[in-house]
Image: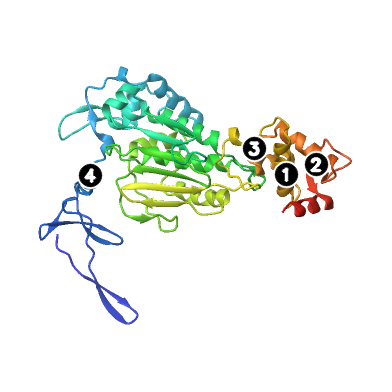
Amino acid sequence: MPLVPEPVELEGQTLLVLSVPESSQVHSCNQRIYSRNEDGDFDITGHGQLLAELYLRKQVGYSENRIFPHIRLTDLRSDLIERVRRNVRLQRAGHPWAELDDLELLKSARLYQRDYQTGAEGISMAGALLFGRDEVVLGVVPHHRTDAILRVHDLDRYDDRDDIRTNLLESYDRLMAFVNKHIADPFYLEGSRRVSLRDRIFREVVANLLIHREYLNPFPAKLIILRDRVLTENSNNPHGLGLLRPDDFAPSPKNPAIARVFREMQWAEELGSGVRNLFRYARAFGGQDPILREESIFRVTVMLPPLADGATAGQTEAGSQPESGAESGAESQARRILVALSAGALSKAELAGRLGLPSVSGALNRGVRRLLDAGLIAHTLPDKPNSRLQQYRLTAAGRTHLNLQN
């Protein structure tokens, strides 16, 4: 195709703009092969992995559409297909998948296909990854693995780990359970309604980790919880290189069939809106924008909120102060309550959220009672101690006590 320069007027000058569209083929110049990205052209001749990734990007189809004609319907888990059917029925009345049998649903979701070039027909890689029995999943993608790691105290190895080698639906469940186990959910109001920042953020992070992975690449996907941040890494078939920002983000699907199942189940947002929501809620959660870097390995960083005593939301409940009434634990929690109230009055539920607790605990009730008895905090409604509108405020003695400790 001939390239025709286009004249453009800019500040009284005429520029000739030559637009070179992306080719579906790999080309060489002077027997050298270059990979183009926003930072320049890089010579990748002789770099086997980079060349393989370039050829993979040039494929006409998606690797998730690879057909496995010898996978039978009985090799899939009918309970998982029924789970999707039941979920979409709850999400939308009259959903077209709700009344389809297993094979019809697979065909409708493009998880059972026919290759009109080769004549092969059967369940696709996407279908096997979503619904396959574990031996089928690993038979189709032998290197399939998602590693969930907590690394807060033992930085050389880990404090907790889940080595996940199963279908994508149960992988999602286990990753979200790992997040909920080890990351606190601070109190947050959207208007007058409390929303879970943790759920809003990590539902998107976990879904992206599973949806946008290049499953032909043996690089193991990871979700790593550190003291102050969460990192994810997954192999990627990039459509550009560099940082992604919500204001200039050009969404491009990586595994459209897998993504559609997640979206129909309300486990993921539409392309683009999910990234914008991630930036919105991550800023409220950890005080900083997330970092999304698209390269051959796609990386996401989400900051965790610091707690009042210098701990972080990445610490597990098992590592928090015990409820045994030990003096050191009581003193630490009392100080955390005082620090939380130094910014203004809070209810017990709001206090629990500020302290990173999933709900109002017995230890929190005891701590509040001790501070009331000591005169360091007071009710905002002293005549109605059991009112549902009751909050707690710092007294002058409490401020003096806190200042003496600092």
Residue 269: percent from the left, percent from the top?
Answer: 45, 42
- Per the model, the C-alpha gap separating discs 2 and 4 is 63 Å
**Residue plotted at (64% across, 37% down):** 357
Q: Is residue 79 above or below residue 300?
A: above
Going by the picture, which residue comes out furthest to the right? 383
* Amino acid type of the residue tagged 2 in the rendering: Leu
Residue located beneath label 4 in the image: 56
Residue located beneath label 1 in the image: 337
Q: Nearer the viewer, residue 336 or 183?
A: 336
Task: Specify whether 2 is left or right of 40.
Answer: left
Secondary structure beneath label 2: helix
Are the two marked residues, 1 and 2, in contact with CB atoms closer than 8 angstroms?
yes
**Residue plotted at (89% across, 41% down):** 383
**Residue plotted at (44% across, 32% down):** 172
Badge number at residue 357: 3
Mark 3 crowdedness (10 Å alpha carbons): few <14, some 14-19, many ≥20: many
Residue located beneath label 2 in the image: 371
Please state which of the two labelled residues, at mark 1 or mark 3, is closer to the viewer: 1
